[in-house]
Image: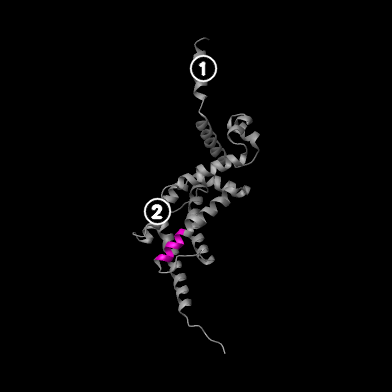
Amino acid sequence: MNRKTPVKRVRAKQRRLSAVDRRSEFVTKATELFAEEGFGGGTRALAHKLGVTQPLLYRYFPSKDDLIREVYRKVYLEPLEIGWEKVLSDRSRPLRVRLQEFYEIYTDAIFNRRWLRIYLYSGLKGLDINRWYVGMVKDKILTRILRECRHDAGLATQGRPSAAELELAWVFHGGIFYYGVRKYIYEAPVLEDKAQMISDALDIFLAGFERMAESATDRRRAPIKVVG
C-alpha cells in the first residue's frame, strides 16, 4: 500500500504544467475535439470533454470564442508562416515556378484531416473561422498572385484585382482545395501525384489569365468612336 503512494505523488507532479504549457494543452485538446465533433455545446460541456473544470478553462480562455480564435491562430495561421509571400513575390524567378512551389508548400500545410474537418465544421456552424480565413486568402494570397500575374503580363499592378480576376483565381484555388477535401474527407480516389495536379491546374489558370489580359489590352487599344 505504501509503495503506491510515491507513484501517485510523481504523477500529480507531472500534471503541474506551466501556464504556457497548460494553455497550449487546452488548444491541442480543443483542436482534436473540434475536428472530431464540431463546435456544438457550451463551455461547461467543452470543459468536461477536455477533462478539466469550467473555472480552470475560464482562467485561460474567458469565453469559447477566445479558445476558437486561438485554435484558428494555431491551426490556420501558424502553418502558413513559412515565407510564402517571399516565394510569390521573388520576381527573379519565373512566375509559374513560384506558383508551383507556393501551392506545393501551401497544400502540405492544409491537406490533413484535422485542418479540413475544422474548416468544414466551422462553415456549417457559421463561425468566424471561415470568414477570417477566406478574407486572408483573398487579401494575402490571391491578390498577391494576381498582382504577379499582371506584372508578368505587362499590366499595371496598382489597384485592386477586378471581380473577374478574383473569380478566376478563386476557381483555381478552390479546385486545389477541393482536391484535399476529396482525398482526406471523402477518401475518394484522386490523382496521387499532387505536384502534377497543381501543375495541371496552373495550366488552366494561367491560360485563362492570359486571355483575360489580352482582352483588357485590346479594349485599351480600341479606337474611341466619336458620335455626332
Q: Quadrant of residue 48?
A: top right
Earlier residue among tags 1 and 2: 1
The overriding secondary structure of the stretch rendered in magenta is helix
- In the picture, measured across the screen, residue 64 lies left or right of residue 101, that is right
Q: Position of residue 101 (x, y in %)?
A: 38, 54
- In the picture, measured across the screen, residue 116 lies left or right of residue 125, that is left
Residue 167 to residue 39: above or below: below
Q: Position of residue 100 (x, y in %)?
A: 39, 56
Q: Which residue is mark 1?
A: 9
Q: Which amino acid, mark 2?
A: Lys
Numbered tag placed on residue 208 in the rendering: none
Q: Which residue is mark 2?
A: 86
Under circle 2, the secondary element is helix
Q: Count every numbered label the image shows and give the total.
A: 2
Name the residue nearer the viewer: 13 or 48. 13
Q: Residue at x 41, y 52 (%)?
A: 104
In which quadrant will I find the C terminus?
A: bottom right
Q: Residue at x 48, y 77 (%)?
A: 219
Colour option used: one colour
Q: Is residue 37 visible?
A: no
Nearest to the eye among marks 1 and 2: give it.
2
Residue 140 to residue 155: above or below: above
Q: Quadrant of residue 149?
A: bottom left
Name the residue nearer the viewer: 127 or 190. 127
Name the residue nearer the viewer: 83 or 94. 83
